Image (cartoon, grey):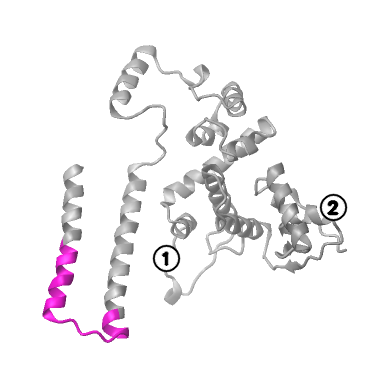
Amino acid sequence: MNELQINSKFRDVVRPLKPDEFNGLEETILRDGRVYSPIITWKGIIIDGHNRWAIIQKHPEIPYTVQEMDFPDEWAVIAWICNTQLGRRNLTDEERTYTIGKQYEAEKMSVGGNGNNQHKKEELPQSEAIPKPRTSERIAKQHGIGHAAVERAEKFVKGVDAAEKISPGAKDTILSGVTKVPKKVIAELPKMEAEQQQEVVQKISSGMPWDKPKSQDPTPKGMKQTIAEVAASLYNTEKVVEHTVDDLLEELALTIEEFDRKTRRSIRIYQEDYKVVLSEDDTNKLIAVLSEAEKAIQKIKETI
C-alpha cells in the first residue's frame, strides 16, 4: 500500500466529519467493497480524501485509487480545495463564508493566480494591457455574491483562526453553526483587546445567546440608550445586519445583467438558431411582456 502524506495545512481547510458521518462513510465503503472516489494528492500529499484515507488505514484490503494533481504552489492547492468544497452542498452558512474567505486569501497569494498575487508584478504589452477584475470580483461572480462579501469573508477567516488559537476547538464550533456569536463580531476578533477576545471566545464555546461584552462597549450610557431606541424602531437588534447598501447595489446590478443576458440570448436563439421570424403580433406580445418587467421595476421604486 502506498504511504501517502498528510499536511494539516491542507487537511484543516475542511471541517472534519462528525463521528456519525464518518461511520456512515465507512459503512458505505465496506458495503461497496471499494473506494470509488480517488484520493487526490499533490506531491504525494493528500489534498482531498482524508476521511477515505483514514478508512483505508483501518481496512487495507479495500481497493482504492490515487490521482496526482499539479499545482504551482501550496496556495494554489488551498484555493483548489476551497473551490472543490464550495461545489458540495453540505456546508453550513459559516463554513461557506469561511471557505470563500480562504479561497480569496489563497488566490491572492498564489503565483498561479490570475495576476493579482501581491508578490508578483507582470508587465503586459500595451496591446494586452486590458484591466483584469480584482480577485475578489472574480470570486464574487463565481459564487454569485458581491465582492464586498468576499472581502468580509476573508476577515471572518482571520477571526475564526484567531478564535482557534485562543481556544482550540472554537473553529469547529463556529463552522458547525452552533455558536450564537454573529459572524461580524467574529471577524472583528483580531482587532480586540485580549480581555475582549476572551469574552467573545467564551461566548463562542458556550453556545449561549449573544450579548455584547461590557469591555467591548465604551459607549456612554445616555448615548447608548438613544442609539438602542432608534435602532429598535428600525429593525430587530437581535440579528446583526451584515449586508451593506453596496452589497444590495451589486446584487441588483448582477440581477439586471443576468436578465439582460438571458433575454437577449433567448431572442437570439429563436431568431438565429430556430430561424423564427417574428410577426408584428409576436413582437407586440414580447413588448407587452417586457412592459410587465417595467411595471415591476416601477413598483419597486415606489417602495424605496
Q: Establish if 28 lies above or below 198.
A: below
The extreme front residue here reads 31
Numbered tag placed on residue 131 in the rendering: 1
* Quadrant, the N terminus: bottom right
Q: What residue do we see at 34% from left, 58% from top?
A: 254
Compared across the picture, whether 295 is left or right of 224 comes to: left
Residue 245 image offset from top left, x and y in percent? 32, 43
Label 2 residue SS: helix
Q: Residues within 10 Å of mark 2 (few under 14, many from 20)?
A: few
Which residues fall within the magenta stretch? Answer: 270-291
Q: Establish if 238 lies above or below 101.
A: above
The extreme bottom residue here reads 275
Compared across the picture, whether 267 is left or right of 181 comes to: left
Residues tagged 1 and 2 counted as in contact (Cβ below 8 A): no
Label 1 residue SS: loop
Q: Residues within 10 Å of mark 1 (few under 14, many from 20)?
A: few
Residue nearer the viewer, 194 or 244: 244
Residue nearer the viewer, 76 or 122: 76
Residue 31 image offset from top left, x and y in percent? 75, 59
Does the magenta-highlighted stretch encompass residue 14? no
Residue 274 image offset from top left, x and y in percent? 30, 84
Q: Quadrant of residue 165?
A: top right
Residue nearer the viewer, 70 or 67: 67
Does the magenta-highlighted stretch encompass residue 289? yes
* Quadrant, the C terminus: top left
Q: What residue do we see at 60% from left, 27% from top?
A: 201
Q: Disc 1 versus disc 2: distance between alpha carbons? A: 52 Å
Secondary structure, magenta segment, majority class: helix
The extreme top residue here reads 222
Residue tagged 2: 58
Q: Establish if 174 lies above or below 302.
A: above
Numbered tag placed on residue 30 in the rendering: none
